[in-house]
Amino acid sequence: MKLEGAVLRNLLARRRRAEWIFKIAASGALLFALGTLGVLLLDVLRDGLGWLDWDFLTHFPSRKPEQAGILSALAGTFYLMILTILIAFPLGVGAAIYLEEYAKKHWFSRIVEVNIANLAGVPSVIYGLLGLELFVRTMGLGRSLIAGALTMALLVLPIIIIAAREAIRTVPNPIREASYALGASRWQTVWHQVLPVAFPGMLTGSILAFSRAIGEASPLITLGALTYIAFLPDGLTSPFTVIPIQIFNWVSRPQKAFLNCAAAAILVMLAILLAMNAVAVFLRHRTQRRMTL
C-alpha cells in the first residue's frame, strides 16, 4: 500500500509539474502575441496619429502626401460592405436554416457540409480569380462596385453559414417540440422560436466575417479595383476603391510621407472594425435581454 501511495504521489506531482509548465508556456505565448500587437499598434499610432484629421477624411487621394485624403476609399468601403451584407447575410442564414432544419441527413447533405467547411479555408485570392472570371468577364459586370460586392459575398458566405449553423444547433430541442405541440408549422417554429434564440450567435459570427472582408485587399486587386480614384461611386456599376487598396498604394510610393498616410488609413480601418464589433456586442446583449424579459 505504501508503494502504491508513493507511485500515486509521484504521478500526481508529475502531472502538476506538466500542468505548471503548460500554463507558463501558454502565458508566454499570450504575452508575446500581445506584446507584438502592442508594438505594431504603437508604431502605427506614432506614424499616423498626427496625420489623422478632418481634412484627411474629407479629401480625395493626391500625388502630394500633404494633400492626400481617404474620402473615396472610405466611401467605397462603406458601399461595398453594405452591398456585401445585403447579399451574403440573407443567403448565409437561409442556407444554414435549410441545412439544419429542412435538409435530410444523407450523402448529398454531407457533401455540401464538407464543401462549405473547405471553402471557409480557401485563400482569398482564389475568390478574386473566381469573381474576375464569373462576374467581370462572364456576367459582364466589369470592374464595378457590384462585382466587388458579389466577390466579397462569396468570400464570407461559408463563414456565415458555419456560424449560423452553430448558432441554430445551440437552440434546445424542447423549444421546437413545444412549438410543434401548440400546432405551429415548421416555418412558424423556425421564424418565431429558433431564429430569435439563435440570432445573437448568428450576428456575432457574421460581424466577424464582415470584419475579415474589410481587411481583404487581394480579391479586389485581382478583380481590378482601382488604386487611385478622385471621385465617389455613383452607382452599382461605378469603379471603386477601398481602404486596404489605398493603403497598399501608399506604402508602395517612394515618398516616405505616404507611409504616414498609410498609417493614418490603418487607424481609420481599425476604428471601423472596433465600431462593427461594438455594434455586434450591443445588438447581442440587447437581443439576449429581450429574450430574458
Image (spheres, rainbow, N blue to C red):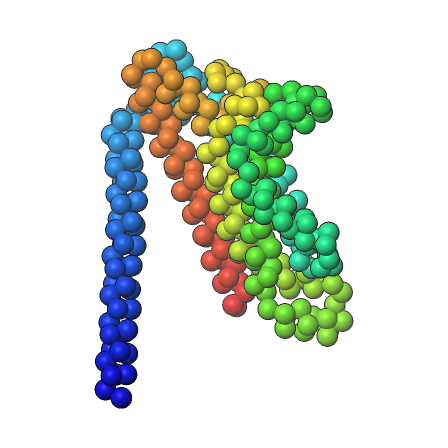
Residue 166 percent across, percent down from the top left: 57, 57
Q: Which residue corresponds to the image point at 46% horizontal and 24% vertical from the top-left?
A: 245
Q: Is residue 234 visible?
A: no
Residue at the farthest top position: 63
Q: Where, by quadrant of the figure, is residue 57 drawn?
A: top left
Residue 209 at x, y percent in the picture: 52, 43
Q: Residue at x 53, y 56 (%)?
A: 200
Residue 172 relative to residue 258: left or right: right
Residue 210 position (above or below residue 173): above
Q: Foreground residue, 34 or 266?
A: 34
Q: Residue at x 48, y 40 (%)?
A: 211
Foreground pick, 162 / 292 = 162
Query: Furthest-bottom residue in view?
Result: 1
Q: Position of residue 267 (x, y in %)?
A: 35, 32
* Residue at figure coordinates x 27%, y 45% from the top left: 32
Does 234 sit above or below residue 273? above
